[in-house]
Image: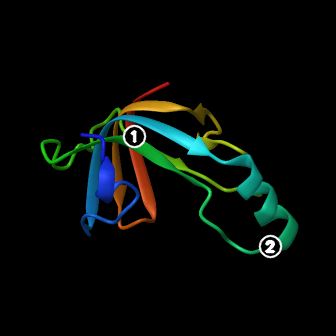
């Protein structure tokens, strides 16, 4: 469900965990460059996908942790350095951890 109209770009819920399908990992390079230049954090990276309530604890043996550090790379990566652009499912946990499965 893509949000359109008055709800587009607005906070519509607060949750401890958010499950997405068909996740696309995005980094705005201009925002990353601003972080590198000024040393101040700004919102310039995230995951876009289809919000779902049906996954409920999707962590499986094929799920991997995904992270983003603008000082190291302009991409989201796995712990072993593999670049992640897309994932079939994504779980965001309290805004600190990202777990993904079916990554590309």
Which of labels 1 and 2 is toward the front? 2
Q: How many dots with numbers?
A: 2
Give above or below for 103 relative to 11: above
User: In which image quadrant can residue 26 be found?
Assistant: top right
**Who is closer to the viewer here, 27 or 11?**
11
Res. 75 in view:
yes
Give above or below for 32 relative to 23: below
Measured from the top left, where is residue 99 in percent x and y?
Answer: 39, 47
Q: Which residue is mark 2?
A: 39
Measured from the top left, where is residue 101 in percent x and y?
Answer: 37, 34
**Who is closer to the viewer here, 13 or 101?**
13
SS at circle 1: strand
How crowded pointer 1 is (Cα within 10 Å; few <14, some 14-19, many 20+) is rated as many
- Residue placed at 63% from the left, 46% from the top? 27
- Residue placed at 24% from the left, 66% from the top? 13
Q: Residue furthest left?
A: 54
Measured from the top left, where is residue 70 in percent x and y?
Answer: 71, 56
Q: Which residue is mark 1?
A: 100
The answer to whether residue 4 is left or right of residue 46 is left
- Residue placed at 24% from the left, 40% from the top? 1
Mark closer to the chain start, 1 or 2: 2
User: In which image quadrant can residue 49 be found?
Assistant: top left
The span from disc 1 to disc 2 (Cα, nearest Å) is: 28 Å
């Amino acid at each position: 469900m893509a949000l359109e109209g008055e709800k587009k770009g607005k906070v519509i819920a607060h949750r401890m965990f958010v499950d997405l399908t068909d996740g696309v990992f995005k980094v705005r390079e201009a925002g990353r460059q601003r972080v590198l230049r000024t040393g101040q954090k700004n919102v310039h990276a995230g995951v876009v996908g289809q919000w779902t309530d049906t996954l409920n604890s999707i962590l499986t043996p094929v799920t991997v942790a995904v992270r983003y550090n603008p000082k190291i790379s302009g991409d989201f990566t796995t712990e072993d350095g593999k670049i992640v652009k897309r994932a079939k499912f994504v779980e965001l946990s309290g805004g600190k951890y990202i777990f993904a499965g079916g990554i590309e």
